[in-house]
Amino acid sequence: MNTTPETNPPESASSLSVYPVEAGPVATFGYMITDTAKGVAAVIDVPLESADYFMEIAEQEQVRIESIFLTHSHWDHTGDVAALLRLCAEKNLDAPKVYIHPDDEYRMGKPNDYTSVPLPFTLEPCKADGFMRHGDIISCGGWHCEVRHTPGHTEGGVCFIDHAQKIAFVGDTLFAGSIGRTDLPGGDTETLLNAIRTQLFTLDDAFIALPGHGNHTTIGVERRSNPFLM
């Protein structure tokens, strides 16, 4: 489990912090955004085996997890949603609300039906409390992000753009030197490349891209050197 990226996102002068958590059998990143002044937090993606870590961070920072925002519904990004909700219930905390793009909701209730290969464990289903669509603004305390629909890895994949801190939570849309898989059901290469060019490469070079796997990068580096987009 890794909770520190190689280079931390730019520190805000406010009470906001970003905590990465790398967990699960395919080393998936989820992220917790905390606002200690307001006592609340949001989680972006909940990889398998990450729930305990997110709860530890919440207790350490004395914040309540208010929302879970999912970049897409592949099992490695949603695998511990139910576990995190259960931990909150065990501690008599209000359950976080779970949000996803409507085009990706269908995998959540039957995650075992949508794995690329048979898994040696059973995934726990979860459900959405609400939907996010392109152009929506998601918030938690003083943290605000723009939702951008970036299909191509999945039909309802989204990225979250924090304009104030120049951070883009890009899920499996864009990686350092690579892009998300498009060979799974719901994937399409040209759709994904178009989404990256129109929704991510329109951002300033300085934006840090925090992906669902691997090292973080910047929009400028990927615009100049990503071999899939040259």
Image: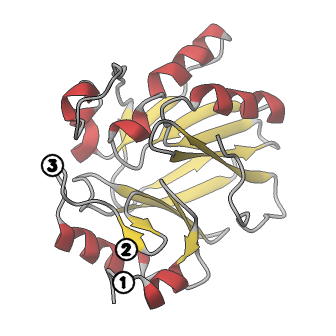
Look at label 1 and name its amino acid: Pro
Question: What residue sits 57% from the left and 32% below the top?
Answer: 50
Look at label 2 and name its amino acid: Gln
Mark 2 or mark 1, which is nearer the start of the sequence? 2
As displayed, is residue 11 above or below residue 74?
Answer: below
Callout 3 crowding tier (Cα within 10 Å): few <14, some 14–19, many ≥20: few
Quarter of the rendering containing residue 136: bottom left
Nearer-the-camera pick, 151 or 216? 216
Callout 1 crowding tier (Cα within 10 Å): few <14, some 14–19, many ≥20: few
CA separation, marks 2 and 3? 22 Å
Nearer-the-camera pick, 159 or 28? 28
Indicate the secondary structure of the residue bearing disc 3.
loop
Q: Which residue is mark 1?
A: 227
Mark 3 or mark 2, which is nearer the start of the sequence? 3
Q: Position of residue 48 (x, y in %)?
A: 48, 31
Q: Which residue is mark 3?
A: 185
Quarter of the rendering containing residue 55: top right
Q: Position of residue 12 (x, y in %)?
A: 79, 64
Look at label 3 and name its amino acid: Pro
Which mark identifies residue 199? Answer: 2
Nearer-the-camera pick, 152 or 42? 152
As displayed, is residue 85 above or below residue 70?
Answer: above
Say left or right for 24 vs 133.
Answer: right
Marks 2 and 3 close (CB-CB < 8 Å)? no
Q: How is the image coloured?
A: secondary structure
Indicate the secondary structure of the residue bearing disc 1.
loop
CA separation, marks 3 and 1? 24 Å
Nearer-the-camera pick, 27 or 91? 27
Which mark identifies residue 35? Answer: none
